[in-house]
Amino acid sequence: MIGRPGKTVRTGYGDEAAVPVIDGTKCNACGLCVKGCKTFTLVMEGGRPAVMPDNGLGCIGCGQCMALCPRGAIRVAGRRISPEDALPMPPREKRATPQGLENLLLARRSVREFSKKEVDRKDIDRILAMASSAPMGIPPSDVGVAVVAGGEKTYSLAGDIMGEFRRWQRFFNPAVMKIARLFMSRYNVEIMRDFILPATAMMSRAREEGTDLLFYHAPCVMLFHQSPYADPVDGQIACTYAMLAAESLGLGSCMIGTVSFAMNQNVKLKERWGIPAENRVAIALIMGHPAFRYARVLRRRFSSVAYP
Ligand SMILES: Cc1cc2nc3c(=O)[nH]c(=O)nc-3n(C[C@H](O)[C@H](O)[C@H](O)COP(=O)(O)O)c2cc1C
């Protein structure tokens, strides 16, 4: 049964609905696709799955039906998803074991000292492929990545962002900080006064001597950005996946948070670095070959764990 585009939620790349297509010759009417479809585009009708494009939210192209169908009888196209996106399931023995994954998570550190070696393009592509499997608010993905590769380029990007930090230094002068409580929350005043301003002043001084304390001279920076329709944390989740992917390839990485504040204030800066004006930078990830090896892992704890 062939579906037709129905209504659906909007994303940064349009409001096209995906179109599910059921191959009646393969479908055994097990109903798994219908159970997996929480937008209710697929329903059981007369004991068989049927496509109802205008039902519920409309097909958002989550692909649950394609992933679940044991017979490959359902395909979804449109909304940047295609039938070719349903790939063979990796066998269980080829997936990370809990111990293997825990070891990877424990061994990862935020790396801030890199060798001069550039990051191989093959590694960058693999990291992007792995990170693109991250969950996101509305699928397939409203996250984009601007990859700034090469030590000279990342140094130049850091220079641009430092320019924005210097503007903050001028704006948030002692007189403004005295009255900042009138237009900023107590927490933001404290963060600005005790962390952002001293840290950016330190970075500025270091930069004058040719030292990059923003990206630590990393040879690659990934800027994760997202459309205004995306969930606010989509880009950060994708970045977390990229970080773990980098770790699995033996690369060191570190998230850099302040970049998003600086770039989101300045449309020209976003556009210069390949980010659409309307998109918001979620976070940056620096990466490269670590300059040294860590001897130990660090135990961390949540600030609290409760079972209310
Ligand atoms: C959202 C976020 C923003 C961060 N921003 C910065 C940053 O601007 N500069 C930096 O040196 N480290 C940054 N970090 C790295 C943290 O400082 C680091 O995760 C922390 O020191 C814990 O160390 P670990 O990652 O080795 O466990 C950031 C981390 C996160 C998760």
Image: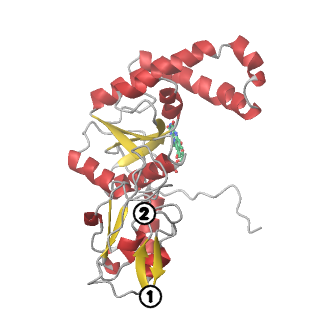
Crowding near the residue tagged with mark 1, few <14, some 14–19, many ≥20 C-alpha atoms within 10 Å: few
Residue 75, placed above or below residue 221: below
Residue contact at pointers 1 and 2, CB within 8 angstroms: no
Q: Is residue 284 left or right of residue 291?
A: right
Residue 103 picture location, percent across and down: 44, 65
Residue 169 picture location, percent across and down: 58, 16
Residue 220 picture location, percent across and down: 32, 38
Q: Residue at left 55%, top 20%? A: 201
Q: Identify the image quadrant of the N terminus.
A: bottom left
Residue 119, placed above or below residue 6: above
Residue 269 location, quadrant? top left
Nearer to me, 67 or 99: 67
Q: Amino acid at mark 1?
A: Gly
Is residue 88 at least partly visible in the picture? yes
In front: label 1 or label 2: 1
**Earlier along the polypeptide chain: callout 1 or callout 2?**
1
Is residue 96 at least partly visible in the picture? no
Residue 112 location, quadrant? top left
Q: Is residue 159 left or right of residue 35?
A: left
Residue with the mark numbered 1: 47
Q: Residue at left 63%, top 58%? A: 301
Nearer to me, 164 or 78: 78
Q: Amino acid at mark 2?
A: Cys
Residue with the mark numbered 2: 62
Task: Tell me the SS state at disc 1.
Answer: loop
Residue 135, placed above or below residue 307: above
